[in-house]
């Protein structure tokens, strides 16, 4: 049986691994773990698949409209941090003109900075991740998942102490899965639901506090709230209409 700490370390480095960003020694160590751990090997294949999909769809994504003010904010951040942040040979003009959706999901440094400072950028990043994860990893025809079993899985695999809101027939919400996703320069839990036939995501930012907000980005609504030392973001398509009952339920249950 593989050591849980080894699996957690591997999970935390998969994003860098599939982007060829690990030092050679760490890459060898991680690949040695993957050779002997089927669950982590499966996670690596899924993470790699997500990266290939985003690269294949990059041209189509360039037609997606930018959220209001996003380019201006990111260009300002780029100017402030250019000396330390932008690699030699990459101009600010070229760096800042990259399409918001692709750049956010691929986790480039500019949007890591912007995500920490802007709810608009955070909403855009999580909306893009929401679309990727449901396309690649969700099985909406599968039976509802057991919330307590998912909590245990998140604890065992990633070391997260998280209360996952269970399915609720009364509120029209069905729990279909949970996984680790990229956030700025780190990772976070992503809990996946179906509400009225629509894909809905709950993201949990640990140790982060933000003011409550409702934003619309890329055809989706992001409802942001903070409880204790955690910020929660519920992402749903505008086409889902009024999901206030499901939103109130998740806000009451998430811990």
Image (spheres, grey):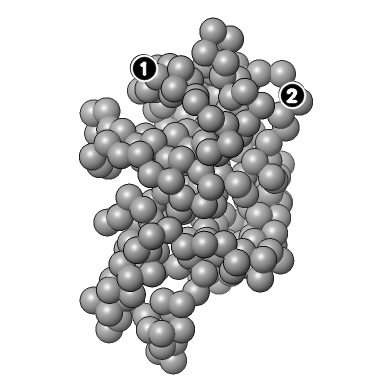
Task: Point out which mark residue 90 bears.
Answer: none
- Which residue is depicted at the point 44% across and 22% down? 244
Callout 2: 10 Å neighbours few (<14), some, many (20+)? few
- Which residue is depicted at the point 35% across and 39% down? 214
The image quadrant that residue 195 belongs to is top right
Can residue 28 be seen in this snapshot?
no
- Which residue is depicted at the point 60% across and 47% down? 131
Work out how far the residue at label 2 is from the one at label 1, CA to CA, in angstroms: 25 Å
Question: Farthest residue in the bottom direction?
Answer: 89
Mark in the foreground, 2 or 1? 1
> Residue 34's spot in the image, x, y percent?
66, 51
**Residue matched to label 1:** 252
- Which residue is depicted at the point 52% across and 69% down? 99
Quadrant where the N terminus sits is top right
Mark 2 in CB contact with mark 1 (< 8 angstroms): no
Question: Farthest residue in the right direction?
Answer: 141
**Residue matched to label 2:** 142
């Amino acid at each position: 049986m593989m050591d849980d700490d080894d699996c957690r370390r591997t999970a935390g480095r998969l994003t860098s691994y599939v982007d060829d960003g690990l030092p050679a020694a760490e890459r060898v160590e991680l690949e040695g773990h993957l050779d002997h751990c089927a669950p982590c090997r499966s996670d690596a294949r899924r993470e790699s698949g997500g990266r290939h999909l985003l690269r294949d769809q990059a041209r189509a994504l360039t037609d997606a409209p930018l959220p209001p003010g996003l380019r201006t904010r990111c260009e300002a951040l780029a100017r402030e941090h250019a000396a330390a942040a932008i690699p030699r040979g990459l101009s600010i003009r070229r760096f800042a003109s990259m399409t918001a959706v692709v750049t956010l999901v691929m986790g480039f440094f500019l949007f890591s900075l912007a995500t920490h400072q802007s709810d608009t950028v955070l909403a855009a990043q999580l909306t893009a991740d929401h679309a990727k994860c449901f396309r690649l990893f969700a099985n909406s025809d599968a039976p509802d998942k057991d919330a307590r079993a998912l909590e245990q899985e998140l604890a065992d695999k990633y070391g997260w102490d998280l209360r996952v809101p269970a399915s609720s027939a009364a509120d029209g919400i069905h729990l279909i899965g949970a996984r680790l996703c990229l956030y700025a320069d780190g990772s976070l839990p992503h809990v996946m639901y179906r509400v009225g036939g629509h894909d809905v995501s709950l993201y949990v930012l640990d140790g982060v506090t933000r003011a409550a907000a409702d934003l619309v980005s890329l055809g989706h609504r992001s409802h942001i709230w903070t409880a204790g030392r955690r910020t929660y973001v519920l992402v749903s398509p505008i086409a889902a209409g009024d999901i206030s009952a499901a939103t109130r339920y998740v806000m009451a249950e998430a811990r």
